[in-house]
Each structure stands twice: as C-alpha cells, then as structure tokens.
Amino acid sequence: MKHIQIDNLDFELFIDYEQIKKRIRLMGIDISMKYADKNPVFVGVLNGCFMFMADLMKQVHVPCEVSFVKLSSYQGVQQDQIQELFGVGMDLAGREIIIVEDIIDSGNSLQHTIAALEKLDVASIAVCALLMKPECLQHEFDNITYVGFEIEREFVVGYGLDYNGQCRNLPDIYKNVVHSETV
C-alpha cells in the first residue's frame, strides 16, 4: 500500500518495513555488543512499542529480561501530566535498563519514565527509540543512545503507532499528507 486514508486524513508511505528491519538489525548488533556481559532489562513503553520491541528483541543476542510500563497523559491545570497505569513488576535495583519507545516527540513521557526508574536505584538507563523528532523535544536527555530514524514534525501511523487507536497493525510507517487548497 502506498496510500491509506483514516477518518478523511490521507497518509502516504514514509518508511517501509524493509528499511525498519535493516535499522533494527543494526541497533540489535550495537546493543548486543555493548551489553554482552550485563544482562540488561528492556522496559517497553506500551502501547506503541509492541511491534518495535518484538522485532528488536529478535536481534538482541545477549541474556536479558523484558518488562513493560503503560503511561497515559492528561491535561492538567498548568501542563500535560503523566500518570503511570502499571509498572514493571520486578526488582530493578542495580540493573542496566534500556527503555524502548516507539517515538520520542516532546519527551514528556520519557522524562517521567526515566525519573520513575531512577527512584528504583538502577545502575544505568539507556533509551532506544524507533523514531525521534528532535525539533519537538522539550527536555534535554543525555541517555538517548539508540535511534532508528530522526524525522521532522511528521504525523505518522503504522508499525505500532496509531491514530485514534487504528493502524498499529500496519507493517510500514505512513505520514500524513497535508493538501493545500488552491484559491
């Protein structure tokens, strides 16, 4: 599929699954080399990370563990607030942590996740994201270690990313096509 439509929005193919797989393979090699003797814990941020994390874990060839957190954001009085819905369910003290994100946009949820993990006295925290929008970041991070693709301010769906709960199941990533009206 080169084009899709969701709720009267048009999307075109942006990053195909073959490109995604190649990039994930390289990320898996890097992670496997760096964590060869460390038994890291991969903490996936649901829901969007599920496809990326599944493919990434197939490319990581070192002993490791996997867990998940689920966050939700809501509009607070002064700013977006992050509310953790459920946590990792294991003791992470002294462990090497790799947070797995589908996309880093503003960085609000990532900041919350890092702060929550730091309170658990972990040994280290690295971040592995499939997509990152550098122009949209509202926070400074020194631990974003693995990034599949840097993108502009694109509205993207597919490969775990959704629009109104739809399109997470698409193997490719699509970007919204903005049509300019002619006068």
Image (tube, helix red, strand yellow):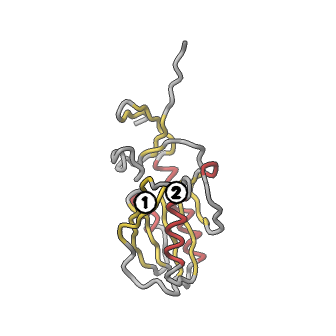
Name the amino acid type tagged 2. Leu
SS for callout 1:
loop
Mark 1 surroundings within 10 Å by alpha-carbon count, few (fewer than 14), some (14 through 19), many (20 or more): many
Q: Earlier in the sequence, mark 2 or mark 1?
A: 1
| x then y, percent, for residue 73 | 43, 57
Question: Is 78 or 148 nearer to us in this picture?
Answer: 78
| x then y, percent, for residue 5 | 37, 33
Taking the image as shown, residue 101 lies to the left or right of residue 7, namely right
Mark 2 surroundings within 10 Å by alpha-carbon count, few (fewer than 14), some (14 through 19), many (20 or more): many
Image quadrant for the N terminus?
Answer: top left
Looking at the image, which residue sits at the far bottom? 94
Taking the image as shown, residue 159 lies to the left or right of residue 118, namely left
Depicted 173 relative to depicted 97: above or below: above
| x then y, percent, for residue 80 | 49, 55
Numbered disc total: 2
What residue is pinned by disc 1? 49
Residue, x 47% and y 54% (percent of image)? Answer: 77
Question: Is 77 or 9 nearer to us in this picture?
Answer: 77
Q: Which mark is residue 62?
A: none
Taking the image as shown, residue 134 lies to the left or right of residue 12, namely right
Name the amino acid type tagged 1. Cys
Check if mark 2's residue and mark 1's residue have beta carbons within 8 Å: yes
What residue is pinned by disc 2? 130
Question: Is 80 or 39 nearer to us in this picture?
Answer: 80
Quarter-wise, where is residue 74 in the image?
bottom left
Question: Is 128 or 134 nearer to us in this picture?
Answer: 134
Taking the image as shown, residue 24 lies to the left or right of residue 1, namely right
Residue at mark 2 to residue at mark 1: CA–CA distance: 9 Å
